[in-house]
Amino acid sequence: QVQLVESGGGLVQAGGSLRLSCAASGSIASINTRDWYRQAPGKQRELVASITSGGSTSYADSVKGRFTISRDNAKNTVYLQMNSLKPEDTAVYYCRLTMLTTRSLYWGQGTQVTVSS
């Protein structure tokens, strides 16, 4: 059983910063991909950023240059540093873990990020 627990969300003014964390516990394969998704009210869930177990990263165009994804494999934790936040970044942010050997997917419960103008 794998569990993901996100933390670090909150309310911030436009231009501010937040750092999200997602800690994984349980039986986790070493080869995996960690992602951050977000879902704003009335919108579909969208991929924000991804990082492989080797450290390769990718970002949605809307967050490039502002968000940074990183991971600590020893702690099974992934981070999302969010700078220069905009009101349109307001959403529930979810982390996801994909184990590439089994194609198993796991989701966290989500953490709310609200950016005021």
Image (cartoon, rainbow, N blue to C red):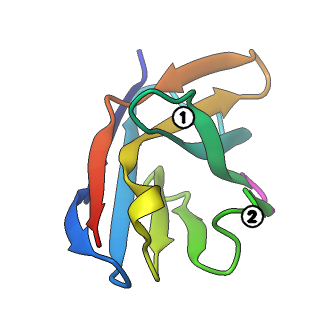
Q: Nearer the viewer, residue 22 or 59?
A: 59
Residue pointed to by mark 1? 96
Mark 1: which amino acid?
Arg
Helix, strand, or loop for circle 1?
strand
Left/right placement of residue 26 relative to residue 66 reads left
Left/right placement of residue 27 relative to residue 97 reads left
Mark 2: which amino acid?
Gly
Residue 68: x and y in percent read 59, 73
Nearest to viewer (mark 2 / mark 1) = 1
How far is disc 2 from disc 1 in space, using C-alphas? 16 Å
Residue closest to the far left: 11
Q: Residue 54 lies in magenta, yes or no?
A: yes
**Identity of the residue drawn at 48% across and 40% down:** 95
Which stretch appears magenta? 52-56
Helix, strand, or loop for circle 2?
loop
Residue 54: x and y in percent read 78, 59
What number is the disc on residue 55? Answer: 2
Left/right placement of residue 53 relative to residue 15 reads right
Query: Which picture quadrant has residue 30?
Result: top right
Q: Residues within 10 Å of mark 2 (few under 14, many from 20)?
A: some
Q: Is residue 8 above or below residue 25?
A: below
**Identity of the residue drawn at 74% across and 64% down:** 55
Q: Nearer the viewer, residue 52 or 39?
A: 39
